[in-house]
Image: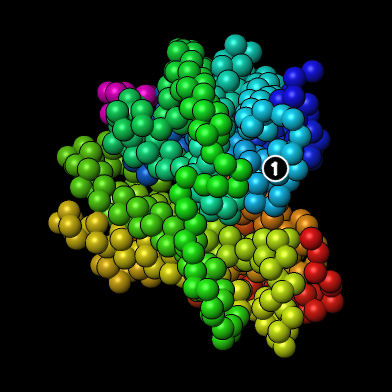
Amino acid sequence: MPAAVRLALNQLQRDRILVPVWILGIALLGFATASAVSSEFGEVGERQAIVAVAAANPAFLFLRGVPDGFGIGAVVFFQGFAFTALLAGLMSTLLVVRHTRTDEELGRAELIGSTPLRRTAPLAATLLVGGAANLVLAGCVAVGYIAAGLPAAGSVTAGLAVAAVGLFFVPVAAVVAQLMPSGHSANGAAASLVGAAYLLRGVGDAIGTPNADLTQVMSSWVSLLSPIGWGQRSRPFSAADTMPLLVLAVAAATVAAVVLITRNRRDLGASLLPERVGRSHGRLRSFVGLAWVLQRPILIGWCVGAAVMGGLAGGLGPVIADAVAGNTSLKELIGRLVPGSSADIVDVFTAALIGIAGVLAAAAGIQGVLRLRAEETEGRAELLLTVPKSRTNWLVANLMLAIASATVVAGVAGAAAAVGIFLTGTAGTPAIQLIAASLAHVPAAAIFIAAPAVIFAAIPRLSVPIGWGLLAGGLVLGQFGELLGLPEWLQAVSPFHHSPAMPVESFDPGSALVMGIVALGGGAIAAYLIQHRDLTG
């Protein structure tokens, strides 16, 4: 048996729980979406109405994708593909970085390298595992669609489309792992590329061209800069075309060949981008100061993403306004999205993108908290806590900075939206209201920060998967809860459900206060629990 295959089997053994959870979660989301569309929009007229509304609303197109007819399968694909492809990309990047840069950082790759194996064997094994995981994902997504009653041929193509996006990001993440000096930075950079792919697809769809009867939208060339945009063009339930998926497969194979050549010329543990060396001497003045030094690069990266999101929210305002100007039917359809509200389309679009910026704020805070787990597993926390300071202070300092990071990221998004609107000369929401709209998502983000802190203090080994899993679950409930026909109480479990979509909706101080109290209580529980456990590896 080739060495790469043996190593791949070993990696699969290590991922025997995590990867199946990812695959089944994505497949179940596809099944639930298909079942919900079939039950909630069973009548042709209902599907025509929702497709027409979506085709007229750039915010909807940005978030979900472009409609391609009003058949049940076509509506399911348009409603769910972009998000499931995003999850497939994240699954692939986390898997690859875990078995490449992180293994090098923790010394596991050095042990494998001491055996008489080719230098590229571990990386080749990881590429095999990533490819196999996405092939299984394709099958599971297809089975889920078929089980929900969709045509088999279209279901298979849709499963391949999701897997093709995930497959593309396998070698891309491997390239990032060669570039970045640590697993932490590699995960952040790779996840940012997945997010950028979603954004590019969203921009290309938002400025796309609807047909005369509002049953289809042709996305612009911008979406072709994204692998998600290519996957979307497979059109599995209307005019199936596997050529875009073949393009992604060829691109993935090309990048894989390049990354194997690069690995063969790189020393173990080295990175193409050197790690910045700090001062040779220093003094620990406070845990807050240390947390700032460690989390500053993370914060900068998330702020850049939030600025891009906010800039899009403001900068695309004129494009959206022009798209509906003088078209009475489009205005009536848009008015149905927010009954009883006087909000215009620019405000609807801005609120949608600022909502995504709220998710970025929560993610920034979560990553800051989960940095504690990396410090613990890599042995630095043990050295740090030899000083006469309590581990409670250590946790609280990082929690405070995580909350501050989420606030800054949200504020940057609002400020960028205001700048974008100002530069385009569009008459829109005042800058102070846009910043307030972004900051309104901070209470929900605070809950997502406190939750992994509690898990870290109680069950540290599960803090990373549960922390990110809670964010994914909250996002699914917030984005798809209504579509899936979930009961109101279940949708209300997600903190995002209680964040007002300002400037379309008004701010609710009661909900913000309750979420703040819940987050504060979670932080207090975490601070108590951290005192009653030992450090773990």
Residue 118: which quarter of the image?
A: top right
The residue sitting at 60% across, 47% down in the picture is: 269
**Residue at which label 1 appears:** 109
- From the viewer's perspective, tell me whether residue 217 is left or right of residue 287: left
Picture quarter containing residue 451? Answer: bottom right
Q: Which residues are magenta?
A: 209-216
Residue 529 position in % (x across, y down):
80, 75
Residue drawn at x 29%, y 23% as measured from the top left:
211
Question: Is residue 195 or residue 289 the one in the foreground?
Answer: 289
Q: Quadrant of the N terminus?
A: top right
Tell which of 469 and 71 is nearer to you: 469
Up-down relation of residue 474 to residue 268 (above or below): below
Placement of 451 over or under 523, stated as above or below: above
Instruction: Say which amino acid is labelled 1.
Output: Ala
- Residue 129 shows up from this direction: no
Q: Is residue 102 above or below residue 535?
A: above
Magenta stretch containing residue 162, yes or no? no
x%, y% of residue 91?
62, 39
**Marker count (numbered):** 1
How would you classify the magenta stretch by its main secondary structure? Answer: loop
Residue 432 image position (x, y, % from top left): 30, 72
Q: Where, quadrant-wise, is the C terminus in this rendering?
A: bottom right
Looking at the image, which is closer to me, 216 or 289?
A: 289
* Residue shown at the point (41%, 32%) measured from the top left: 226
The residue shown at (29%, 36%) is 207
Q: Choose between 58 and 93: the one closer to the eye.
A: 93
